[in-house]
Amino acid sequence: TVKVRSVQSFIETSGEVEARTNVSVYPEIGGKVASLAVEVGDEVRKGDVIASVDPSKPGAYYSLSPVKAPITGTVTEIVSRPGTTVTTGTAVVKVGDIDDLVIYADIPERDVADLKVGLRADISFPAFRGEIFSGEIVRVSPVVDKASRSKQVELRITGSDSRINAGMFPKLKFYTRIYEGYVVIPDEAIVTRAGKNYVFL
């Protein structure tokens, strides 16, 4: 049956769950990572020694230099393992607040006109088939990335769920404009043959 009704427009894309606060930890001096006191998932407090760097060189020996956590949080990534040569610009680990998770997604330039803070989205994860989580945009980048021709958006997940972890890749459906007075039919009434769509009367 053909009906006249409103049509909801949407944008579909994928994103990545990350800790909103995720800090790279750098050594104060270059050398080789001598030891690592943490692994991914370990909780650390600000000031904890999480690694040590040996700045010694042939013919010159120095004391180990401690690498300390700059914030309280959870180790989200090990960047440099023991034996790795690092500089003051090389991260050793990353520490983040995994209780404060957000989703980052890149939206193509053709769709950026529909982006705004508060825009609702359905969020789904491969690990939880058939389950839909909700969220909304809390920040829209003010610039378009020149390389990807896209804008980054930041989403907050409504409520908290311990099953959602940093590093997950969710599918996102943003609900944008509503168009009134369109003639519509069910999807199952459309038959595709040789790449073209047909409807039988």
Image (tube, rainbow, N blue to C red):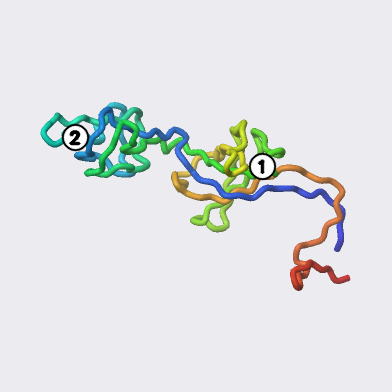
Instruction: Kindly identify the residue that appears in the image at 78 percent across and 44 percent down.
Output: 178
Please name the residue shown 64% across and 45% down the image. Answer: 108
| Disc 2: CA contacts within 10 A as few (<14), some (14-19) or many (>=20) | many
Q: Nearer the viewer, residue 19 or 147?
A: 147
Q: Nearer the viewer, residue 94 or 179?
A: 94
Give coordinates of residue 184: x percent, y percent: 83, 57
Residue, far front: 59
Residue 23: x percent and y percent?
A: 39, 33
Distance Cα–Cα, label 1 vs label 2: 47 Å
Q: Quadrant of residue 93?
A: top left
Q: Are marks 1 and 2 in contact (CB under 8 Å)?
A: no
> From what the image shows, is residue 139 above or below residue 135?
above
Q: Which residue in the protein does label 1 denote?
A: 109
In the shown orientation, is residue 140 left or right of residue 2? left
Total numbered labels placed on residues in the image? 2
Residue at 81 percent across and 48 percent down: it is: 6
Examine the image and state in which quarter residue 63 appears. Answer: top left
* Element at label 1: helix
Q: Quadrant of the C terminus?
A: bottom right
Which amino acid, by three-letter code, is at mark 2? Asp
Relative image position of residue 172 (x, y in whole percent) = 60, 48
Earlier in the chain: of badge 1 and badge 2, it is 2
Q: Tell me the residue at 31%/40% (across/down).
A: 42
Q: Which mark is residue 91?
A: none
Q: The disc labelled 1 sits on which kind of residue?
A: Glu
Q: Residue furthest toward the right?
A: 201
Q: Is residue 9 visible?
A: yes
The front one of 109 and 7 is 109
Q: Which mark is residue 54?
A: 2
Residue 110 vs residue 122, the one in the foreground: 110
Percent x, y of residue 1: 85, 63
Q: Is residue 199 left or right of residue 128?
A: right
